[in-house]
Amino acid sequence: MSDNLNSGLDSTATFSIDGRRVPFEAGQTILQAALAAGVYIPHLCNHPDLKPHGSCKMCTVIVNGRNGSACTARAMPGLEVENDTPALNDRRRVLLQMLFVEGNHFCPGCEKSGNCQLQALAYDLEMLAPHFRHAFPARVVDASHPDIWLDLNRCIMCELCVRASRDLDGKSVFMLAGRGTNSRVVVNSPSGLLKDSALTIDDRAAHICPVGAILPKRVGYAVPIGERQFDQATIGHQVDYLAKRTIPIRPVAAETAAATEGN
Ligand code: SF4
Ligand code: FES
């Protein structure tokens, strides 16, 4: 959709989400406007520093009676958006259940527990059981890099690492390979191992994973369980935190990046 369609909007342009008026600026997506206004729409593959991807479908809302991805649909005056409804949250729970069973997620033993967006969404949407049969796939664990773990058992295929490495770091360390259920993240290096790739601890790609698939080493428990991001408030009550992240972020030092991405 052309930006021109939104040009000339005055500062009072609004649309509604679940009956609440939400202001927006020209060019914003429904998700961006919602988060800026303090309205949480569940999402996993979206990041404010990257172009919308539209792949996880967690942000699906009803826009004027039709399904649409809030991360890709442009905010327009007068739109009527349904978001926090029993039917939409049922669908989101099913998506979560499928993500949990198609990987190997063992939250109690995961260093990312409490900072993991998949786990946090499952709590927020009150997912009580996996419902589907676990696939227990054989996935790669690569501990070869001196500073970064890669555990694809936890990967949800959001491609944030792929996009961050390509678009923010200019390296393309991660890529997708395979099709359908055989799709997987692979490392772009002569050996296929992380240690032989161009990835460094200061890369955005090293810190952007919303789950525990890519983690900096030696800091897994620097913040104790019970004091982590989603231990403090559910993901649905963190829109202020998320809204702050819409500010453009420059490449940052490893310590700052870890805090920014919630590792
Ligand atoms: S490794 Fe993490 S960031 Fe990369 S695709 Fe998997 S879940 Fe997403
Ligand atoms: S956040 Fe919109 S499709 Fe993933």
Image (cartoon, grey):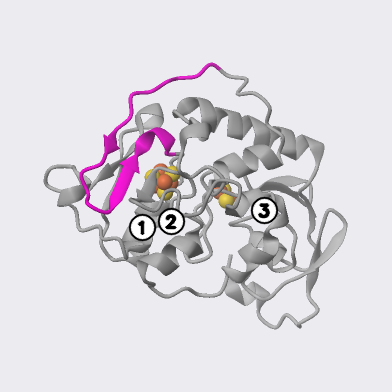
* Mark number, residue 208: 2
- Mark 3: secondary structure: helix
Q: Amino acid at mark 2?
A: Ile
143 part of magenta stretch: yes
Q: Are marks 3 and 2 in contact (CB under 8 Å)?
A: no
**Under 8 Å from ligand 1: the CB of mark 2?**
yes
Q: Circle 3 is placed at which residue position?
A: 232
Residue drawn at point x = 33 percent, y = 24 percent:
138
Judge whether residue 51 can be spotted in this image.
Answer: no
User: Residue 118's mark?
Assistant: none
- The residue at label 1 has a CB less than 8 Å from ligand 1: yes
What is the residue that sits farthest to the left in this orientation? 190
Q: Which residue is mark 1?
A: 205
Which stretch did the figure color magenta?
A: 133-155
Tell me how far mark 1 sits from mark 3, CA to CA: 25 Å
Where disc 2 sits, the SS reads loop
Q: Secondary structure at mark 1?
A: helix
